[in-house]
Amino acid sequence: MPRGEIDEAWIEEAVRRYRRIESLQAEFDQAVATVEVTVRSPDGLVEVVVTAGGRITDVRFLGPLHARNPGTSPDRCRRP
């Protein structure tokens, strides 16, 4: 192919691959949104449900928060 000409077949293949990548990304995003994990605070008073994508879907307080001792909370549970 002479220099400066456009290779239509190459462009069409690139567009097809890009669309396939977009489709796979959308499928992955949907799958990630359905996976959830539940974690509890070390003292067992707070439970958080999070999707694999990082979205918090639920926060539950399982015990009386007024009864906990703030001095015993680990640093990793505090906001910096």
Image: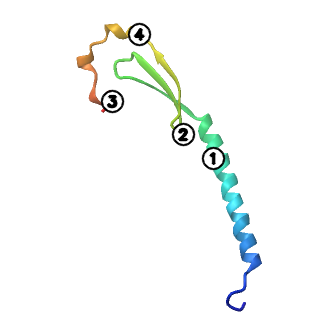
Q: For the residue marked with disc 3, what is the amino acid?
A: Arg
Quarter placement of the N terminus: bottom right
Q: Are dots 2 and 4 in contact, CB under 8 Å?
A: no
Q: Are marks 3 and 1 in contact (CB under 8 Å)?
A: no
Using the numbered discs, state the Cα–Cα distance from disc 3 to disc 4 in whole angstroms: 21 Å
Q: Residue at x 72, y 81 (%)?
A: 6
Image quarter for residue 18?
bottom right
The x, y position of residue 50, in whole percent, is 51, 31
The residue beneath circle 3 is: 79
How far is mark 3 from mark 1, CA to CA? 31 Å
Coloration of the structure image: rainbow
Disc 2 marks a residue whose amino acid type is Gly
Q: Can you identify the residue that label 4 sits on?
A: 63
Mark 3 or mark 4, earlier in chain: 4
- The quarter of the image holding the C terminus is top left
The label nearer to you, 3 versus 2, is 3
Mark 4, Cα crowd under 10 Å, few <14 / some 14-19 / many 20+, is few
Question: Image height check: is 32 above or below 42?
Answer: below
Horizontal side of 42 relative to 15 (left or right) equals: left
